[in-house]
Image (tube, grey):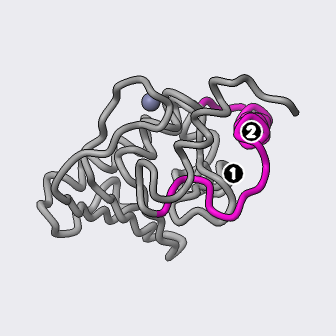
Amino acid sequence: MKQSPNLQDIQEAMKPGSLSAEGFLGTDDRSLSDILQADQQTVRRLGVTDQAIAAAMRRLTEAAKTGLGKPIELDGLYEATDDEFMGRLPCPFRDNFKAEKRITTVHNLATGQTMAWSDLNIHMIEAHGFYEGFGSHYRLEPAGLVDFLGGVERLRA
Ligand SMILES: [Zn+2]
């Protein structure tokens, strides 16, 4: 699909070395609008919202922050660890948002699965419905992420 010049500029800024060393698109050769559309379809099909997903992620990140680098248990289901780095990362969508450089690593005690995300991931999902491109280090598959966060029922609650 042909995308707006604005999205085209944003896609340029998402390439490696512009705003971040690794960039946000990985090995994905789709246009940014196609990436956004495909993930929005998945989120809609699941019957959840980007905002509910982001809220569940933020809750884990906020819990992790209280551990100051040590794992914090939440709901008897998750163990979340916070890693904070110096500086801030600008959002590539040009909204003047700057995220703290933080990685939250979450271990799901029920499934044994581990996922990690940055504060910028949470913002990009909440504000832009962006889960990064295929092959990107911090790509979060919406369906897998929803599962990890406890499933659709929990996110709708
Ligand atoms: Zn933004």
Which quadrant of the structure image shows residue 120? top left
Q: Residue 24, position in %: x, y?
A: 54, 53
Q: Residue at x 65, y 57 (%)?
A: 144
> Which residue was labeled with disc 1?
143
State the quadrant of the N terminus.
top right
Q: Residue at x 43, y 71 (%)?
A: 109
Q: Residue at x 65, y 29 (%)?
A: 7
Magenta residue span? 22-49
Q: Residue 40, position in %: x, y?
A: 72, 34
When the figure is inspected, residue 47 is found, relative to residue 57, above or below; the finding is above
| 129 vs 12, nearest the viewer | 12
Q: Secondary structure at mark 1?
A: helix
> Which residue was labeled with disc 2?
46
Image quadrant of ligand 1 equals: top left
> Relative to residue 83, is residue 12 drawn left or right?
right
Graded by Cα atoms within 10 Å as few (under 14), some (14 to 19) or many (20 or more), the crowding at tag 2 reads some
Q: Is residue 27 magenta?
A: yes
Q: Secondary structure at mark 2?
A: helix
When the figure is inspected, residue 54 is found, relative to residue 60, above or below; the finding is above
Q: CA distance from mark 1 to mark 2?
A: 8 Å
| 107 vs 4, nearest the viewer | 4
Total residue callouts: 2
> Relative to residue 77, is residue 15 drawn left or right?
right
When the figure is inspected, residue 4 is found, relative to residue 14, above or below; the finding is above
Q: Residue 103, position in %: x, y?
A: 32, 59
Answer with mark 1 or mark 2, whichever residue precedes in sequence.
2
> Relative to residue 74, is residue 13 drawn left or right?
right
**Residue type beneath disc 2:** Leu
**Residue type beneath disc 1:** Ala
The disc at residue 61 is none
Is there CB contact under 8 Å for labels 1 and 2?
Answer: yes
When the figure is inspected, residue 91 is found, relative to residue 61, above or below; the finding is above
